[in-house]
Image (cartoon, helix red, strand yellow):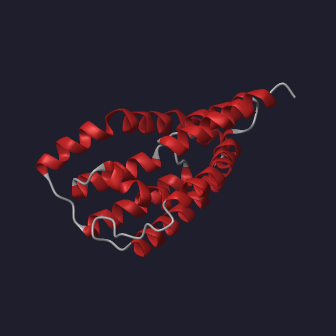
Amino acid sequence: MHGIPILIGAGLMAGAMNALAGGGSFVSLPALIAVGVPSVVANASSTVALYPGGLASLWVYRRAGEPVCGVPISVMAGLTLVGGLAGAAILLSTPGAVFDAILPWLLLVATLALAFARSLGEALRRRARVGPVAVGAAQLLLGVYGGYFGGAVGLMMLAVWSLATGADLKALQAPRTLL
C-alpha cells in the first residue's frame, strides 16, 4: 500500500513528460522497480501504462500522414510494428537476471541519446546524408529497441529522421507520436 502514492506521482509525471517531449519511462520504470515489481514486468508495465497518454497525444496529430524521409508512413508503421513485436518477444524471453544486468546499460544509452541526440545529429548531418532504405532499416531497429525497452525511442526516431532530412524537429512530431 505504501507504494501507491509513489506510483500515482510517477505515473502523472511520466505521462506529462511523454505528452510534452518523451522520456516518461525514465520515471515510471524506476518507480515500478522501487515498489518491488520485477524489472521485466516493470518494463512491460511501464510501456503499457504510458500507452493511453500516447493515444491522447496522437489525437492531436490524427491527420498526420506525410512520408518520413521519403518513406510512406504506412511502411514506417509496418516496420515499427514488426520491430516492436520482435523486441517484445525478445523481452519476454529474457530472464529477469539478464534483463537486470542489461537495464543499466539501456538506461545509459537512452540517457546519452537524450543528452546528445541534437548535437550528434547536427554533426553527422554535416558529414553524411541518409536515404530512404537506411531510414527504413533504422526504423525497424528502433522498433526492436522500442519493443524491448523503449526508453527515449521517440527521441531516437527524431534524431535519425532529422539526420536524414535536416527537417525541423517540430515537423517530425506527428509521425513520432504515431509511430
Q: Residue furthest top?
A: 2
| 113 with respect to 59 (left or right) | left
Q: What residue is shown at x 32% (from left), y 49% (from top)?
A: 169
**Percent position (x, y) of residue 110?**
44, 39
Residue 97, placed above or below residue 86 = above
**In front: 87, or 139?**
139
**In front: 41, or 128?**
128
Residue 155, placed above or below residue 69 = above
Q: Answer yes or no: is residue 179 visible.
A: no
Tally of marks: 0
Which quadrant of the figure contains the N terminus? top right
Q: Answer yes or no: is residue 58 visible.
A: yes
**In front: 25, or 98?**
25
Question: Picture quarter containing residue 74?
Answer: bottom left
**Percent position (x, y) of residue 148?**
55, 52
Q: What residue is shown at x 23% (from left), y 58% (from top)?
A: 165
**Percent position (x, y) of residue 118?**
29, 40
